[in-house]
Image (cartoon, grey):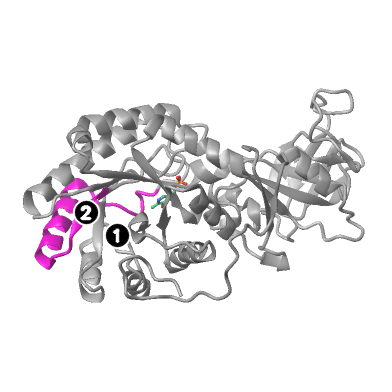
């Protein structure tokens, strides 16, 4: 049974004691691992299901990058982005990472990962960051001492007042102008400054403790001006709380939205604005600033390998349809839900491993714009199109392998088993940092 620190409740999760990652391969690189694995698989006898490789070294590099710019902001991994239990365990082992959970099951994932590692969980490092919570899940979180949540409505405070034991603390989630984001969130969540102050009044009336403010600039946001307004607005509501509530605010949650590709500039803006608006609190060490990082932590760590299950060449043109055993209803749902552009990389061509090849070599047809491919998933649905028109570095036939790099964010998290294809995928961990 696992008892969270400071809680009288305990919870028992089925089978555990496995403090090792299920598949961990020492002394390898992604390319070498793929080579060794793929040459052993034969599509005539093996299932050749899609699988992942997770590069632990890349996670460490991303965390280092984060610290280099925003050392004073503690990363809270947004489990929704990739709830792979071994990935969660890995993050716990790396240390100094909190968790943003959107639901009861995500809370369980984080608890179970601690239990499997034989570690106590400090629930101060968890946030139940969903402004609208089913009552039974709210009660569940409260019973486990997960007592920090976000809210954006008066109705939700009433729910908290009625169904929790009085220990639930809140962050008020304010809206942002996240129109530049690939996945805007403020369309659904957040309250403007004026309404937020009404929420503050209600919290005070009902004795719900407000610890601070949360915002999210939108997943994959591009316009850093969003940050400037969000930090300023947060301070406005923060001041109002501090003026009216006995306990002073001490947590600012700056959400997620960062990506490897779009980090340095927004990080500098965020740093600047926080120094401007929260400089005093930082100086006096009486503020905890957290960031709910999803894609920044998980996207670039994962590579997905999928198998070519069929090829159809047009007789009177140079167009070829390539069918894979993963697609829009599987891991590549990110094309639909997360608006991602994916880039198929040929791993094997006619059975020969070519991922290491220089793509400009003479065997490659990368420069041959004449060969056009369309890439499809395995289901019977015409929507299941991964790329309507693309070139490939090498020609492929049935049984070859295609890879997708940067495949760790919003991929397996929302995969379905539509048409009877699996949504469970093996993941092997390697560490390129040792
Ligand atoms: N926090 C909340 C409340 C979210 O809704 C999301 C994504 O939807 C995240 C964090 C993670 O965002 P990202 O993956 O863009 O960092």
Side of 301 where 206 appears, left or right: left
Q: Quadrant of residue 231?
A: top left
Residue 59 falls left or right of residue 203: right
Residue 198 is labelled as: none
Q: Position of residue 31 (x, y in %)?
A: 75, 38
The percent position of residue 79, horizontal first and vertical second, equals 48, 55
Quarter location, residue 84: bottom right
User: Which circle marks residue 211 in the picture?
Assistant: 2
- Of residues 314 and 64, the one nearer the viewer is 64
Q: Considering the image in quadrants, where does the C terminus appear?
A: top right
Q: Residue at x 58, y 74 (%)?
A: 15
Residue at mark 1: 148
Give the answer, above or below, for where 60 lies relative to 156.
Answer: above
Q: Looking at the picture, how far across and down is residue 433, in whole percent? A: 62, 37
Q: Is residue 108 left or right of residue 356?
A: left
Q: Is residue 389 visible?
A: yes
Q: Residues within 10 Å of mark 1 (few under 14, many from 20)?
A: many
Spot occupied by residue 283 in the image (x, y as percentages of width and height) = 20, 34
230 and 127: which one is in front? 127
Q: Earlier in the sequence, mark 1 or mark 2?
A: 1
Disc 1/disc 2 C-alpha distance (Å): 8 Å
Q: 115 or 215, which lies in front?
A: 115
In the rendered structure, does residue 195 fall within the stretch colored magenta?
A: yes
Could you tell me which secondary element the residue under label 2 belongs to? strand
| Image marks 1 and 2: residues in contact by CB distance under 8 Å | yes
Residue at 77 percent of width and 58 percent of height:
49
On screen, 45 above or below 52? below
How many residues crowd mark 2 within 10 Å: few (<14), some (14–19), many (20+)? many
Magenta stretch bounds? 185-213
Q: Residue at x 70, y 64 (%)?
A: 422
Verify whether residue 24 appears in magenta.
Answer: no
């Amino acid at each position: 049974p696992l008892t969270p620190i400071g809680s009288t409740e305990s919870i028992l999760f089925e089978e555990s004691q496995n403090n090792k990652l299920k598949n961990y391969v020492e002394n390898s690189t992604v390319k070498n691992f793929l080579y060794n694995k793929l040459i052993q698989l034969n599509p005539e006898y093996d299932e050749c299901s899609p699988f992942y490789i997770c590069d632990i070294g890349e996670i460490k590099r991303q965390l280092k990058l984060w610290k280099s710019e925003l050392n004073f902001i503690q990363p809270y991994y947004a489990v929704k982005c990739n709830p792979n239990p071994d990935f969660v365990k890995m993050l716990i082992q790396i240390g100094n990472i909190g968790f943003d959970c959107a639901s009861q099951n995500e809370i369980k994932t984080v608890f179970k990962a601690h239990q499997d590692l034989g570690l106590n969980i400090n629930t101060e490092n968890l946030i139940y960051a969903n402004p609208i919570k089913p009552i039974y899940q709210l009660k569940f979180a409260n019973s486990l001492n997960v007592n920090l949540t976000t809210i954006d409505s008066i109705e939700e405070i009433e729910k908290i007042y009625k169904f929790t034991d009085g220990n639930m603390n809140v962050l008020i989630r304010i809206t942002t102008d996240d129109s530049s984001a690939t996945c805007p969130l403020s369309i659904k969540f957040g309250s403007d400054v004026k309404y937020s102050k009404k929420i503050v009044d209600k919290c005070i009336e009902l004795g719900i403790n407000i610890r601070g403010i949360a915002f999210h600039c939108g997943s994959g946001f591009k316009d850093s001006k969003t940050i400037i307004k969000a930090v300023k607005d947060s301070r406005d509501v923060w001041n109002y709380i501090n003026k009216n509530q006995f306990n002073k605010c001490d947590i600012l949650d700056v959400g997620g939205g960062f990506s490897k590709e779009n980090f340095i500039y927004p990080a500098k803006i965020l740093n600047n604005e926080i120094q401007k608006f929260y400089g005093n609190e930082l100086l006096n060490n009486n503020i905890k600033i957290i960031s709910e990082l999803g894609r920044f932590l998980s996207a670039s760590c994962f590579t997905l390998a999928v198998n070519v299950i069929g090829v159809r060449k047009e007789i009177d043109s140079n167009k070829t349809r390539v069918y894979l055993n993963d697609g829009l209803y599987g891991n590549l749902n990110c094309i639909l839900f997360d608006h991602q552009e994916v880039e198929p990389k040929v791993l094997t061509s006619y059975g020969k491993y070519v991922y290491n090849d220089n793509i400009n070599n003479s065997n490659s047809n990368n420069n041959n714009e004449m060969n056009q491919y369309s890439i499809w998933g395995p289901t019977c649905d015409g929507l299941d199109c991964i790329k309507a028109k693309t070139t490939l570095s090498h020609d492929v036939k049935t049984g070859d392998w295609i890879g997708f790099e940067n495949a760790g964010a919003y991929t397996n998290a929302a995969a379905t088993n539509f048409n009877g294809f699996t949504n469970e995928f093996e993941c092997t961990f390697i560490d390129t940092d040792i």
